[in-house]
Amino acid sequence: MMGYQLDYQHKLFLTNFNLEKRIRKDHILRKITEKIDFDFIYKEVEDTYGSNGNVSVPPPVILKMMLLLILNDTRSERELMLTIPERLDWLWFLGYDLDDEIPNHSVLSKARARWGVTTFKRFFDCIVWQCVEAGIVDGSKLFIDSSLIDADASNNSVVDTHRLKRYLNKSYKHLEKRLDDLEVQKTTPANTRFISTTDPDASVTRHSSGKSKLRYKTHRAVDERCEVITATKITPGSVDDSYVLKEMIETHEQNTQKKVDTAVGDSKYGTIDNFLLCHDLGIKAHMPSFEEKHRGSGRQKGIFPKEAFTYHPETDTFTCPTGETLRRRNYNKKRKHYEYKASVKICAQCELRKKCTRAKDGRTLKRHARQDELDIMLEKAKCKGAKRDIKHRQDLSERSFAWSTRYRFKRAKWRRLWRMEIQDFLIAAIQNITILIKQPKGRLSKSNVQTVERITYLKREMCSSLIRSCMTVIAGRFNMALGFG
């Protein structure tokens, strides 16, 4: 017999209603509550509040609201506050009852300004340390990568400061205020010429063959064992990846209290300075050489590589393919390398000049002051283990960033660099929390750690085997279609 729904009548009183019983046992917010202690925030922000006046919203509640904002990919803080009364799980997570008053959305923006970036960094650091105590962080091998983030600003807001007069004539007061703010800043904007009046910290950056946009860049260090993010940093989009390697290693070691044994990155990190940095720190640099990867491209295309010249340590000279000698001439203090040149007259009369150089003064070779140490690091970066780590980095780092797209990390929620840092710390903390709550209670034993690593290895091998099988099948069908098989 079919049932009919009666007209709903609002109840004046709710009896025997328990919000706790409405949340299922395996709900993610329940697991987060069991694993994470948010009360640490009281001590972190107590100096930012006065001793009298109106009573504020409890800091743990504000922090939980910001987590919900990122975790559920809520578009705005207004929408978050409108949605909270409609979600029983959110009310339970925040410690509210059905008839409790929800704070105004401005509470979150005021709290960010009041607390500053340090509080959110401290929250991220606490989560990382909790992962270390749970035994899901190895800490010896570090995978580093970066990704661009679109700023919350239009390209129409970009001003060419070299032609600023015509803009000042249109909106003098507005731009004067922006320029005054820039003078007060301790750090100059990323682009000294092109500045956005909406978000001066973002820089005009182009990725590959795409369009130039206002962007930030997030740099991320990921541990190999369970892919926990151990260090993260936000910079303007124009900042080169190689400049942040030292800071990422230091932050990783500080957060995990573990010494880095191997640093893995792509060719953007494989600069001379980074190889020598790793040598001084006793770290294996598993990253392709930037110089070697880009050799033979651009102006160097069709030109003899440096390997075509023979170095003689006893005389500190080079010999070119025709047998002429290149002697040491100058020393570059900034780049810390020596320059070797042959006679200009001899180079001008050489038959192989077109294959050797396009410079009027002849071919110049550069040798770093610490070339012997650099050669050792470059040789180690070509071993089988390094090649395996470099290939594994593509999967591990890209997987970490792909996970972040669930929280819309490719687009800035707020403007200015310090707010972007807050967003980045929250996203990284949420990813680490998600990894943490999936682990069994207590610290992983050595056997369990080996099991996790073995499973990770098998998954990687299965994926590689599956890809090879698919490629074989596709190639076979392609040959059959062409009549070769």
Image: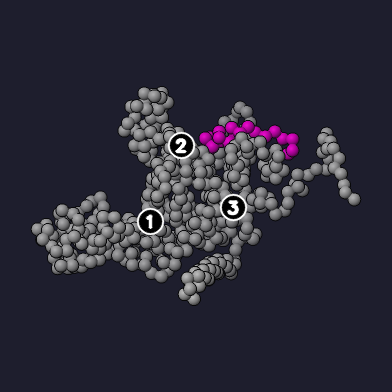
> Which region of the structure is painted magenta?
97-116
What's the residue at 42%, 48% (across, down)? 210
Q: Position of residue 254 (x, y in %)?
A: 47, 53
Q: Could you classify mark 3 by the number of other residues whose Cα lies within 10 Å: few (under 14), some (14-19), or many (20 or more)? A: many
- Whether residue 423 appears in this view of the structure is yes
What's the residue at 70%, 45% (across, down)? 89
Residue that label 3 marks: 433
Secondary structure of residue under mark 3: helix
Of the residues tagged 1 and 2, which is closer to the observer?
A: 2
Residue that label 2 marks: 154
What's the residue at 47%, 50% (across, down)? 232
| Mark sitting on residue 418 | none
Q: Amino acid type of disc 2?
A: Ser
Q: Amino acid type of disc 3?
A: Ile
Q: Is residue 304 above or below residue 42?
A: below
In this picture, residue 191 sits left or right of residue 427: left
In this picture, residue 443 sits left or right of residue 367: right
Real-space Cα separation, disc 2 to disc 3, in angstroms: 33 Å
Residue 106 lies in the magenta stretch: yes
Q: Residue furthest front?
A: 483
Q: Is residue 147 above or below residue 51?
A: below
Q: Foreground residue, 125 or 8?
A: 8
Q: Residue furthest left?
A: 345
Real-space Cα separation, disc 1 to disc 3, in angstroms: 28 Å
Residue that label 1 marks: 269
Q: Say which label, 1 or 2, has the lower sequence index.
A: 2
Residue 75 lies in the magenta stretch: no
Do residues under tags 2 and 3 come within 8 Å of each other at their CB atoms?
A: no
